[in-house]
């Protein structure tokens, strides 16, 4: 496999192609001891280093992993927050020789389904508007909502950054001023769900993503915890965007032990979360 360096590192899950291009431009990437330049090519058998650290490329492009994370309110979708706020990466398991790439983002006040993968190409494909991957949200709104308002939201509203609309709006629960709706978007502009409702004089008090494409938020994954998807679900994601199916990577040795310890800590957090959220007798 002789590929451009940014594609090779994206296939290995080290970062997105755009990120790697920035690293190359900043002189952070070397190939066989020489500083890489944009346009350079390499194979998985070359020695590639990022910031002096050797990148493992043995399985580059041959496997992929995907996590589902139930994001709580208050976490930000970045690796290192300059304000010191908790991030969505804080409790994820380690991926040896790879790194987790978030598929899309949720703002600090939005909870729910967030996908992570070690396959940069899959992440880019799932996020790109041309793929037409829809996202479903449960939203609690306060204000008067009638059929005419819902039709306007589905037909399209001109926001500051262009036209936006829901492809579907369905009443879910509640009465009076506070009601729950499920809404569907085909792309994820910044705070788009909130801005669409607020453009009609309706405030959003809670927002939770419950589906991304063919993946629903599992009911057995409490807030702040994760689960790794199996081969069938990972295949479904690849099929959704017309990508080649790949095997989920099999862990062995020390990496497997570390993952099992992380999963055990998961169960402790899940138990603690369920005790905090269960009604008192």
Image (tube, grey):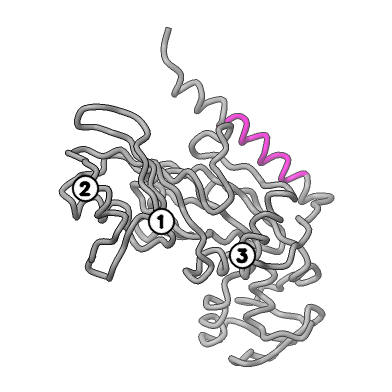
Residue at image x 24%, y 43%? 147
User: Mark 1: which secondary structure?
Assistant: strand
The location of residue 93, given as percent across then percent down, is 63, 48
Judged left or right of residue 185, residue 140 is left
Sequence order check: which comes first, mark 2 or mark 3? 2
Q: In the rendered image, which residue does mark 3 sit on?
A: 241
Residue at image x 50%, y 64%? 132
User: Mark 3: which secondary structure?
Assistant: loop
Q: Residue 238, relative to residue 35: is it above or below?
A: above
Q: In the rendered image, which residue does mark 1 sit on?
A: 185
Residue at image x 63%, y 89%? 36
The location of residue 212, given as percent across then percent down, is 52, 52
- How far apart are the two marked residues, 1 and 2, measured between alpha carbons? 19 Å
Q: In front: mark 2 or mark 3?
A: 2
Q: Residue 62, relative to residue 17: is it above or below?
A: above
Residue 148: assigned label: 2
Judged left or right of residue 4, residue 73 is left
| Range covered by the magenta-colored residues | 257-269
- Which one is nearer the viewer's eye here, 235 or 119? 235
Q: Considering the image in quadrants, where does the N terminus appear? A: bottom right
Q: Considering the image in quadrants, where does the C terminus appear? A: top left
Residue 84: assigned label: none
């Amino acid at each position: 496999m002789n590929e451009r360096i940014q594609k090779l590192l994206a296939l290995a899950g080290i970062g997105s192609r755009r990120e790697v291009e920035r690293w190359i431009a900043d002189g952070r990437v070397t190939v066989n001891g020489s500083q890489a330049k944009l346009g350079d090519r390499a194979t998985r058998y070359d020695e590639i280093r990022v910031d002096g650290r050797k990148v493992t490329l043995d399985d580059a492009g041959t496997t992929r992993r995907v996590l589902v994370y139930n994001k709580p309110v208050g976490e930000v979708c970045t690796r290192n927050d300059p304000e010191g706020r908790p991030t969505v990466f804080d409790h994820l398991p380690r991926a040896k020789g790879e790194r987790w790439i978030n598929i899309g983002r949720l703002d600090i006040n939005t909870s729910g389904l967030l996908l992570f993968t070690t396959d940069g190409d899959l992440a880019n494909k799932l996020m790109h508007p041309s793929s037409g991957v829809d996202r479903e949200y449960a939203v609690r709104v306060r204000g008067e909502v009638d059929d005419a308002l819902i039709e306007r939201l589905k037909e399209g509203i001109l926001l500051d950054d262009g036209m936006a609309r829901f492809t579907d709006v369905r009443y879910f629960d509640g009465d009076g001023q506070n009601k729950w709706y499920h809404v569907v978007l085909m792309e994820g502009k910044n705070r788009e769900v909130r801005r669409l409702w607020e453009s009609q004089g309706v405030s959003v008090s809670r927002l939770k993503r419950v589906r991304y494409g063919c993946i629903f938020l599992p009911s057995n994954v409490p807030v702040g915890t994760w689960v790794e998807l199996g081969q069938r679900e990972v295949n479904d994601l690849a099929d959704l965007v017309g990508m080649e199916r790949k095997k989920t990577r099999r862990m062995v040795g020390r990496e497997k032990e570390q993952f099992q310890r992380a999963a055990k800590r998961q169960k402790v957090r899940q138990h603690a979360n369920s005790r905090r959220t269960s009604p008192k007798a």
